[in-house]
Image (tube, rainbow, N blue to C red):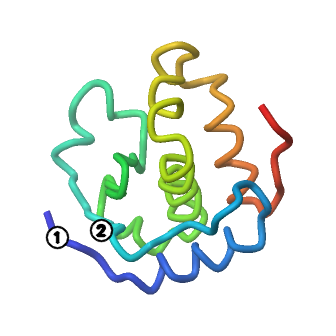
């Protein structure tokens, strides 16, 4: 499990800085991108290419670190956690994954579109 290049993180931040979602821009100083293939062999994680836990972006493989859309999506989850550290993770327990507004927000942000208030 190794930490990957931060250049893609800087570029993803620049993309998110153009999207008006939260009062403060995403902070990336303590964000790590790590490839953890073993994690994605577990049943819950098999469906994902990336997974965010607070300031840690986990990837299925090192090659996915070049996927700027994926990194931007996952960095949006970091941003969400920076503004809603309790509400955001609990929303997955309450609403699930498929129709979670935080997932939709991250998809829209990675595509460069803002999301109206939940």
Q: Which residue is mark 2?
A: 62
Q: Position of residue 41 (x, y in %)?
A: 22, 37
Residue at the extreme top: 94
Instruction: Give me the residue at 40% from left, 70% from top.
Output: 65
Locate the C terminus and report the quarter of the image it occupies: top right
Task: In the displayed orientation, state which residue is furthest to the front.
Answer: 23
Q: Which residue is mark 1?
A: 2
Which numbered mark, 2 or 1, is in the foreground of this view? 1
Label 1's element?
strand
Give the image location of residue 20, x and y in percent: 79, 61
Tell me the crowding category of disc 1: few under 14, some 14 to 19, or many 20 or more residues within 10 angstroms, Cα based: few
Pick the front one: 16 or 47:
16
**Residue shown at 42% from the left, 48% from the top:** 49
* Alpha carbon distance from label 2 to label 1: 9 Å
Residue drawn at point x = 30 percent, y = 60 percent: 61
Residue 93, which numbered label? none
On the image, the x and y values in percent for residue 23 come to 71, 60
Numbered disc total: 2
Task: Give the residue drawn at x 45%, y 86%.
Answer: 7
């Amino acid at each position: 499990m190794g930490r990957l290049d931060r250049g893609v993180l800087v570029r993803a931040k620049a993309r998110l800085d153009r999207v008006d979602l939260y009062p403060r821009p995403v902070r990336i100083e303590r964000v790590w991108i790590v490839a953890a293939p073993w994690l994605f062999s577990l049943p819950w994680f098999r469906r994902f290419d990336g997974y965010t836990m607070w300031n840690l972006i986990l990837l299925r493989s090192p090659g996915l670190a070049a996927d700027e859309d994926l990194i931007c999506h996952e960095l949006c989850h970091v941003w969400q956690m920076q503004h809603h550290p309790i509400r955001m993770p609990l929303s997955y327990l309450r609403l699930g994954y498929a129709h979670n507004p935080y997932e939709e927000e991250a998809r829209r942000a990675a595509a460069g579109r803002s999301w109206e208030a939940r």
